[in-house]
Image: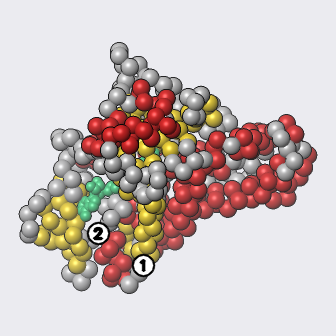
Amino acid sequence: MTIHERRPDPRRERAAAGRSINLALANRGIHALEQAGLMDRVRPALIPMAGRMLHDESGRRQLIPYGNKPHEVIYSVSRGGLNALLMDAAEATGRVSIRFGETCRDVDFARRRVRIRAGDREEIHEFPYEALIGTDGSASAVRDAIVRRTRGEADEQPLGHGYKELSIPAAPGGGFRMEKHALHIWPRGEYMLIALPNADGSFTATLFLPNAGEESFEALRRPGDVRGLFERRFSDAIPLLPDLVEEFFGNPTGHLETVRCHPWFFEDHAVVLGDAAHAIVPFHGQGMNAAYEDCDALDDLLEDERRDWGEIFAEFESLRRPNADAIAAMALENYVEMRSTVREPGFQMKKEISFRLEERHPRRFIPRYSMVMFHRIPYAEAKRLGAVQDGILEELTGNARKAEDVDLALADRLIAERMPEDVLGGEH
Ligand SMILES: Cc1cc2nc3c(=O)[nH]c(=O)nc-3n(C[C@H](O)[C@H](O)[C@H](O)COP(=O)(O)OP(=O)(O)OC[C@H]3O[C@@H](n4cnc5c(N)ncnc54)[C@H](O)[C@@H]3O)c2cc1C
């Protein structure tokens, strides 16, 4: 198998700035890495994050656990480190060759060739393929070629908010300046700052802001504008960000969008997966996890040697597209949760009640966040069951002021009526 990768080999050259330096790995990604036999090598690089550490405007901190059990955590991992490990492992099989600095420009389906440009040179080289798997990210050239050839559709929905990465250095001696085992959030209603820990004691912070408007990237033109916003809204973060202004103006502003397309494949020629098929906003921490889950699903389908590529690609899309649509929607919803609702007492009470209900009905009532992050229940099913749970929680909390007020007998009845007996199916 040959991989054509646009960028230079990141193991030799410094990676370009701008894409998140660390990201959250959860159960779906872990499962796929286990299937690939790589988890033993990935595990030492992981930093568990047990919950969201909320920072309010007066600097008070509050930890809201993600899950209900000690193992229900997500993990911060270095993007570059994980990519390098995967590339090393792929090359070590002796069956994969990675050609760096090669950009896919187009696909000539009639001649079964992929058109590649090497480096900055103008000329195009053609490579024959048996099957082409487009994993070329949210601006995929393979997706464009498939959609054009099939007269399909690609829809790119900008979020209207962007992001900027900033760094929180380690304390002298390499210690962490804040709780290490948490994902830190400064929720501010319309926008937020977050920070994930790195193995060297530093944190990578990301500021998410509207692109335009009164408090937006567009409005932050001068150093004083940036300092002013942080003094007003993120004052406890200022001592943690010694290079705030330099980084704000030196680092690129990232763009966020949701990409949906159809079809994901063309006959027995080509398929797209990962962000190329379904780029989502990063607020559920699931883009990479979903891409790994795609790989695992495609790998399972490849086991059946009687099928041709066309049948495999068609089944892959029918299995995965409903799930990709569901996580895209849940990721958008999670932005509102992280930047705003997480602060509300009603949200925290519902979370507490959900955990109690999970304890009473461990295979029947699993909070939606847990279904997405700690289980492999298909995303579409998690979304559907999450809506049923919301209805139950609404009914239960109508008059409740605290979790203890909830009528547990009513809760048991509603769950028995509305939730399937075993949402985990064959998972465990
Ligand atoms: C700020 C931010 C935070 C995120 N946090 C998380 C998180 O916490 N957890 C999580 O699960 N996900 C997260 N994600 C999402 C995650 O980064 C993506 O979903 C994931 O990287 C998708 O993997 P991919 O391989 O499909 O695409 P990419 O990672 O985009 O990889 C595409 C590759 O193709 C190459 N390429 C592009 N075009 C071409 C071309 N024409 N020819 C050849 N090569 C090409 C690129 O150089 C790149 O190496 C985050 C994303 C962002 C932006």
Q: Quadrant of residue 151?
A: bottom left
Q: Position of residue 78 (x, y in %)?
A: 37, 38
Three-letter code, disc 1: Glu
* Disc 2 to disc 1: CB gap under 8 Å: no
Left/right placement of residue 161 relative to residue 356 reads left
Q: Quadrant of residue 200?
A: top left
Q: Examine the rendering and report whether any part of residue 43 can be seen.
A: no
Reply above or below: 261 against 68: below
Q: Nearer the viewer, residue 213 or 6?
A: 213
Q: Residue at x 84, y 51 (%)?
A: 398
Left/right placement of residue 307 relative to residue 399 reads left
The residue where tag 2 is placed is 141
Q: Nearer the viewer, residue 184 or 150?
A: 184
Reply above or below: 202 against 397: above
Q: Which quadrant, please, contains the N terminus?
A: bottom left
Q: Position of residue 100 (x, y in %)?
A: 18, 53
Three-letter code, disc 2: Ala
Q: Quadrant of residue 225?
A: top left
Q: Residue at x 21, y 40 (%)?
A: 14
Whole-angstrom CA distance, mark 2 to mark 1, is 14 Å
User: Regarding mark 2 in the picture, which secondary structure is present there?
Assistant: helix
The residue where tag 1 is placed is 153
Q: Position of residue 175 (x, y in %)?
A: 41, 19
- Label 2 CB less than 8 angstroms from ligand 1: yes
Q: Examine the rendering and report whether any part of residue 59 can be seen.
A: yes
